[in-house]
Structures are given as C-alpha cells and as structure tokens.
Amino acid sequence: MDPLSHLRAADPVLARLLAEHGPTEPRPPVGDSYTALVRAIVGQQLSVTAARSIYTRLLEHFGGQAPTTSQILAAEPDAMRVAAGLSRAKVGFLRSLAEHVESGELDLRGLASQSDEEVVARLIAVKGVGVWTAHMFMIFELRRPDVLAVGDLGVRRAVERAYELPELPAPDELERLAEPWRPQRSAACLLLWHSLANAPAEPPPAALDA
C-alpha cells in the first residue's frame, strides 16, 4: 500500500486533510549530506527567506560554491560570520560539523545503512545539531519513511487544528496520536505541513538541542 493510501485508511482525520488539500511531494534532496547539514544549520531559527539569503551569502564568501569541510575549518571565523551574516554560535556549529566529518566521527556515507535511532544519535553528537535538525535531514535528505518530527511547530500546529485540540500537543501526545500512521509518519508530516501551507517550522530556541 502506498503511503497516502495507508494514511487515508489509518486515520480519518488525515483522510479528511487529503480530501481537502490533496497530496504533496517533499522538496528535492540536496544530494550531498554534508551540504544539506550546512544548510540546515544556517537555517535554524530563521524564516525560509532569511535562511536562503544568508546561505547565498555564505556561498559567495566561498567563491559561489558550497564550502567543503577543509574550507570551513581554514576560514577565519569572524570573517565568515560577518560576510554571511551568521551568528558566532552558528559559525561554531559549522566548524563542529566540519570537525566531526573530517575526523571520521561522523561518517555521512554510513548513515544510509544505520537505523533511524542511530542516525539521530550520530547527528546530535555534533554541536548545534539537535533532534529537530536530525529529523528534517532524515525526512528530506535520507528520505526515511517513518520519521515523526515531534519538535516541529508546524506539525504540532497542524495537529492542534486538525484534531481540534485545546492546545499544542506535547511530544508524548503527538506520539500517541501518530501511532496509527506507522510506518508512514514522514508522509503524515508532509501532509500536515501542506495543510497549513507551511514549511517546516523550528522549535523555540529553548527546545533546540544545541
């Protein structure tokens, strides 16, 4: 059974959302795991427009190309921060990512053969990469089918509206509601975002696992 047929049969609320809003497709993957994570870090706690602008300025700082790990580590941190409009914290996060990849602590090619739990554990070992970022990477880059983005405000808002809840669901309540969606919870997240005409929304800063 295809993902949307499964969701339609598993949950009448999602069936209604599909009838009202139609199906949606995930954005194309970046195609390079390291670059995808760089973009994810740059975009944390920013609007889509602001994230795109800062990432473009970061590329310009490195000659129009996505920076490699060695380029990030060789770059003067303050110069990179000013040129791209990054915070000091995010420059540190980008350097941490580069260090983990360079040292082999984070084997990006090996992630494809690891379980979802192992992927999250490997990614959140990098400073500045939290569970939300790991979930977005798994949904959009690795195309994992059964990821529930419990920390995403867009998913939580959509569930609050669709299920007519009195407030945003807590992670454990969202997990309970999403149990029938297995093993297609990633498709459910896409549908929920689509129902709000909303891109993935980051959790508040206090919830970031930085």
Image (cartoon, rainbow, N blue to C red):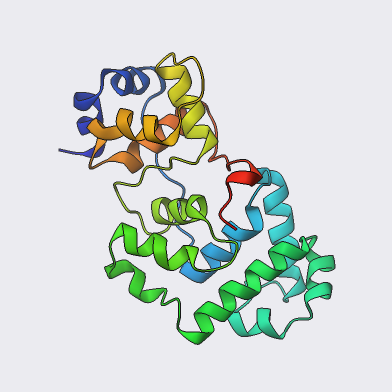
Q: Is residue 15 above or below residue 200?
A: above
Q: Is residue 119 above or below residue 43?
A: below
Q: Is residue 92 above or below residue 155?
A: below
The quarter holding residue 80 reads: bottom right
Q: Position of residue 59 (x, y in %)?
A: 70, 68
The quarter holding residue 114 reads: bottom left
Is residue 29 visible to us here?
yes
Q: Nearer the viewer, residue 132 or 64?
A: 132
Q: Is residue 94 left or right of residue 35?
A: right
Which quarter shows the C terminus? bottom right
Q: Nearer the viewer, residue 55 or 168?
A: 168
Is residue 24 visible to us here?
no
Q: Position of residue 72 (x, y in %)?
A: 67, 78
Residue ID at (51%, 19%): 167
Q: Is residue 47 above or below residue 6?
A: below
Residue ID at (68%, 43%): 47
Q: Position of residue 41 (x, y in %)?
A: 61, 59
Q: Nearer the viewer, residue 98 or 36?
A: 98
Q: Residue furthest left?
A: 1
Q: Is residue 101 left or right of residue 204?
A: left
Q: Position of residue 19 (x, y in %)?
A: 33, 18
Which quarter shows the N terminus? top left
Query: How many numbered callouts?
Result: 0
Residue ID at (37%, 21%): 17
Residue ID at (39%, 41%): 25
The quarter holding residue 22 reads: top left
